[in-house]
Amino acid sequence: MKRILILFSILVVVKANAQQLTLDDAINISLKNNFDIQIAKNVAEVNKINNNIGVAGGLPTVAATATDQESIVNINQKLNTGTEISRNGAASNALNANVTGSMLLYNGYRVVATKKRLEELQKQSEQLLNAQIQNTIASVMLKYYDIVRQQSYMKTLQQSIDLSKKQLELIQVKKDVGLANNADLFQSQIDLNTRQQDMQTQQLIVAQAKTDLIRLLNIKEDSVIMIKDSIIIDKNIQLVDVLGSINQNPLLLSLDQQIKINELLEKEVASLRKPALRANTGLNFGRTQSAAGQVLLNQSYGPFVGLSLSVPIYSGGAVKRQQQTAGINTRNAKLQKESVLAEYKTATIKTYQSYTSSIDQLKTQQNTYQLSQQLVDLSLQRFQLAAATIIEVREAQKSFEDAGFRLVNLSYAAKIAEIELKRVSNKLGM
């Protein structure tokens, strides 16, 4: 009795500490804790920071430099006047400082192309973040509904166990009055034991599925979660709507941006073959002082302004080859986008076929499940009246289990197809 009370107390504590988890809770937790989403966010933040005209080279640059050199020199000078100056260990100081500014005026519109490329990189990283969010939501939903499915198996097994217990009770009563033998009793007990073992195996499957979900949510490994839910299917999805929205898939949008990025890279490379004009201005200061020699002090300072023109003449064909390579990369990006689009459309059609087939089969399977329940009840009643054998009861019970499993599997198959169709069309979570 004491051991029973201790076990009951443990179960109460576990249940009290268990976290009731809904699908919305699971999605929100995963979006907050998922490492891949955090990495994608950081990449998007980096590209947002880099999307600046200064990074593209379109803003002036200003630099200040200063040098101060103190030295001891030996001086030996002969002037044209006939004067000779000779001194050892004379102190000398040279101070130079300047502030210079440079502004790019023209370089074949390379700055414009670079700035547009940085904008496209930012948009692409945002689309890739959206794609990662959609993929994470889909993964959580699949694992969540897998747990619901496995728990539904447990409900069917529990009903079957209850039927086996009732059957065992009936056989025991019949045996007591001499209407059944030990063979029927032993067989019924074996059937009950087998189903109880199946239940233990199914409990392990559910526990491991919850562990996988906990890992996906990135919460404490020893967390205890409870899920009480059912599989509800959206039966209003139309193939034409999905195919019409497939171009809004964030991965395909990111491939469109990759094409634009490569086209802008072509322009950047092409600009290397054009002249570059730069304006320069600044302020110079120079001061040289010596303890001996003809010039004891020389100091100059003042502003300056000028233009510098750079004209590429020959680079060994390197720029031309870079431009050809950039063009090939652009064509490859277009081919990759078309390939992914074709794969998406094919996969979408197959997924939709699975979706509609599962929904159509569900109607028949629900009727089969109801009939199997009635058959089990009728078989038990007939067995109680000695109008049916234990084998007939067992077959009816097996039909009930199979019908229950198929019903759950069809619901899950329709649900995962629904999730994939919404993910592809960028409508998951809407």
Image (tube, rainbow, N blue to C red):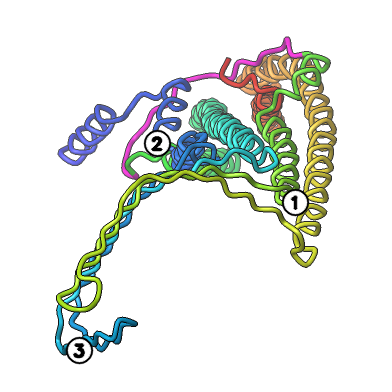
Q: Earlier in the sequence, mark 3 or mark 2?
A: 2
Above or below for 376 versus 45: above
CB under 8 Å between discs 3 and 2: no
- Magenta segment, prevailing SS (helix, strand or loop): loop
Q: Can you tell which mark lies on residue 86?
A: 3
**Relative side of 243 to 131, left or right:** right
Tag 2: amino acid: Asn
Question: Earlier along the polypeptide chain: callout 3 or callout 1?
Answer: 3
Q: Tell me if I can see residue 209 in this picture.
A: no
Judge left or right: residue 88 versus residue 133.
left
Q: In the rendering, at what x and y percent does residue 151 appear?
A: 51, 30
CA separation in Å, label 3 and label 1: 56 Å
Front residue of 163/86: it is 86
116 above or below 324?
Answer: above
Q: Which residue is mark 1?
A: 273
**Which residue is label 2 attached to?**
33
Q: At label 1, which amino acid type do we have?
A: Arg
Q: Which residues are magenta?
A: 221-237
Total numbered labels placed on residues in the image? 3
Q: Foreground mark, 3 or 2?
A: 3
